[in-house]
Image (cartoon, helix red, strand yellow):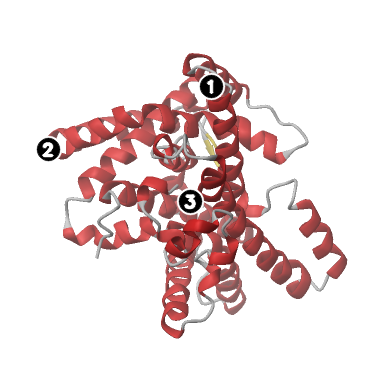
Amino acid sequence: MSNPDRMPWVDTAKGLSIILVVMMYSAYNTGEYTGGVGFLHYVIGFATPFRMPEFFLISGLFLSQVIDRPWRRYVDRRVVHYLYFYVLWAVISIGLKIGIFSGDPAGMLHDLAMAIVQPYGVLWFIYMLAVFGIAIRALRELRVPHWIVIPLAAALQMWAPKPDSYALEQFAAYFVFFYLGFVLAPLIFRLVEWTQARPATAVAGLLAWALVNGLLVYSPGYAMQPVGMQMGLAAWPPLHLALAVAGAVALCVAGGFLSRFAAMEWLRWLGEHSLVVYVAFTIPMSIFRGLMLASGLLTDTGMLSLAVLLVSVISPVVLYFIFKRIGFGAFLFERPAWAHVDRPNAGQLSNKGVARPAREAA
């Protein structure tokens, strides 16, 4: 059942986003070990301009409803929430990969220390959500107008600096999309509502967008590699930024269209629990890919990438339901009461965890 406090189309769009994110890691991780390129490489290549921007734009959609709350409550919802899962899963991931599988205790301690100042692995997204939450609240307190922030953030994204700090690099690359989600939320909500009432128009618009996006990504100059790709004309920074915003909005419209169908309830649920998948998918991904290649049962890059994608998405969900069933390990996916700094409401929120109302969700 859908949570009545949530907007189904937002969760459906998040479901599309988490699948695209896991698909990228599945395809590139597989390609790295097989040295080949599979059909999922081309699917994720199409999504390259908007894959992560869409996730950040959606994360900013409901920020206006919490931005002016007292600092303590705001920090609890928009900063501590993400840092809890970042720290927890960074410890788990580093402990397993470096401490146990690699047998390198010294390296494990080093990576744990570095994870404080440099986002670790795929968890960088959660780390940056906390950083963006602080940054926008600070800009709000300083009363910096949108017409100053947006051009500067856009220029920073197009400049694409490569400093020694990975956190600064990712801030430059994605802050503009989070901020645009915050500022453009009313327009996006109206657009999705308008297209939901006109499904034929929504489908036509999405097809036109997909054609333009695909032609620009796969225009002369593109190069597909086992790990990563070089886009064609879409690589030009101003065009890349425009395609990122257009693609992010298009996925919101697609979420609005798909949420009309009962058959897409699984996608909505996946989006509502996207953090469950995001924090845990890399562990089953690596284990399954390694087993398949070692056994020789599945070596084709395309089919193995697809199998890795399915295992990577389904495994965390199965684990989540097991822990919910046995009543143990829920802290892996739901923030416990002790991890709240907004203590007066801690008891009210402790059972919602990553599935809290969408108006306060990323």
**Residue 217 locus on image (x, y percent):** 44, 32
In-image side of 281 versus 185 (left or right):
right
* Displayed quadrant of residue 106: bottom right
Distance of label 2 from label 3 (alpha carbons): 29 Å
Q: Residue 197 carries which label?
A: 2
Q: What residue type is labelled 1?
A: Ala
Residue position marked by numbered label 1 in the rendering: 154
Q: Which amino acid does label 2 sit on?
A: Ala
Q: Is residue 184 above or below residue 115?
A: above
Q: What residue type is labelled 3?
A: Val
**Callout 3: helix, strand or loop?**
helix
- Of circles 3 and 1, the one toward us is 1
**Residue 274 locus on image (x, y percent):** 43, 57
Q: Which image quarter is the N terminus in?
A: bottom left
**Residue 133 locus on image (x, y percent):** 55, 39
How many C-alpha atoms fall within 10 Å of the one at disc 3: few (<14), some, or many (≥20)?
some
> Residue placed farthest to the right in the image?
106
- Which is more N-terminal, label 1 or label 3? 3
Q: Is residue 179 above or below residue 349?
A: above
